[in-house]
Image (cartoon, helix red, strand yellow):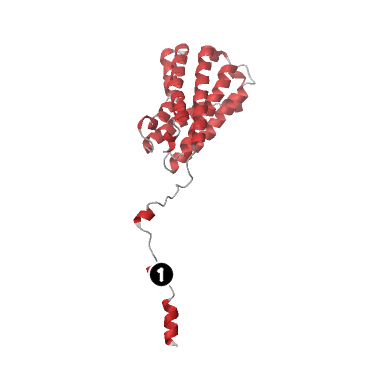
Amino acid sequence: MSETVHDRRSTVPDPSHTPVPTSDAASRVVVPPPGGSPSSATVRAAGALLAGGATAWAVGTLVVGDAVLDGVQVLDTVTGLAYVAGLVALVLVLRAARLTGNRFGRILAAVTVVVLAGAFLVNVLSLGYDHYDEFPQALMALDACWPLGQLLVLLVGVVVAVAGRVRGLLRWQPLLCGLWFPVSTLAQIILGPADSVVVSAAWLLLAPTVLGVRLVLRPRDLVS
C-alpha cells in the first residue's frame, strides 16, 4: 500500500521544478503600453487639420488686413474656425501620444481643448453680428477663450518640450506653434495693426503649417 501511494505521488509534478522561460524567450514578450498610441491615420488627420487651418487663416488675415478692426469679417472668422480646429486636433494627438508628460500635462491638454472649444463657439456665434460692440455680455465673456486658449497652447508646447519624449526639432515645434500669440501681439504693439498682420501670417505658415505637413508626411515621428 505504501509503495502504491509513493508511486502516485511521484507522478504529481513538483511546482518548484516548473520550467522557467529563458531570457531569450522572455525577450520576445512585448507588453503594450497602457492606453496605446494614436494610429498613423489619426496623426495624419490631425496634421492635415493643423496645416490646412493655419494656412487658411494666414491667407484670410492677409486678405482682410486691418479691416478686422472695423467689425466682424466673415472670411477672417471662418478661417479662424479652421485654425482653432487644427489646434484642437494637435493638442489631442499630443495627449494621445503621451508627449505632454505626466498627469499635470494630460490635465492641461484636456483643459486646453475645452477652452479652445469655447473659442470655436465664439467664432460661430459672432457670425450673427456685424460689429463687436453688438456682442451680448455672455458672448463678450466667452470671447476671453480666444486669448486664454492661445496661452494654454503655449503652455502645452512648454510641457512637451520639458517632457522631452521626442527629440530634435519635433520637440520644439509645438512650442513654436504656441508662440504665435505673444509674437503677433508684440508685433501689433511695435509695428501697428497693418504690418503685424504680415508677421502673424508668416508665423502661422512657418510654425503650425510646417508642423502639420510634417505630421502628414511622417506620422511615425510622433509615436515612435
With 137 as the anchor, is 12 left or right in this view?
left
Most distant residue in the right direction: 128
| Front residue of 194 and 61 | 61
Q: Position of residue 80 (x, y in %)?
A: 54, 22
Q: Tell me which residue sits at (53%, 20%) in the image.
A: 56
- State which quarter of the image contains the C terminus: top left
Q: Which residue is identified by label 1?
A: 15
Q: Position of residue 75 (x, y in %)?
A: 58, 17
Mark 1 residue element: helix
Can residue 45 be seen in this snapshot?
Answer: yes
| Front residue of 194 and 80 | 80
Vertical arrangement, residue 194 with respect to residue 152, above or below: above
Vertical arrangement, residue 82 with respect to residue 29, above or below: above
Q: Position of residue 6 (x, y in %)?
A: 42, 82
Choose top left, top right, bottom left or bottom right for residue 125.
top right
Q: Label 1 amino acid?
A: Pro
Choose top left, top right, bottom left or bottom right for residue 185.
top left
Q: Tell me which residue sits at (35%, 31%) in the image.
A: 168
Can residue 144 be seen in this snapshot?
Answer: no
Choose top left, top right, bottom left or bottom right for residue 133.
top right
Q: Residues within 10 Å of mark 1 (few under 14, many from 20)?
A: few
Total count of labels: 1
Q: Tell me which residue sits at (44%, 43%) in the image.
A: 103
- State which quarter of the image contains the N terminus: bottom left
Q: Position of residue 99 (x, y in %)?
A: 42, 38
| Front residue of 152 and 98 | 98
Most distant residue in the bottom direction: 1
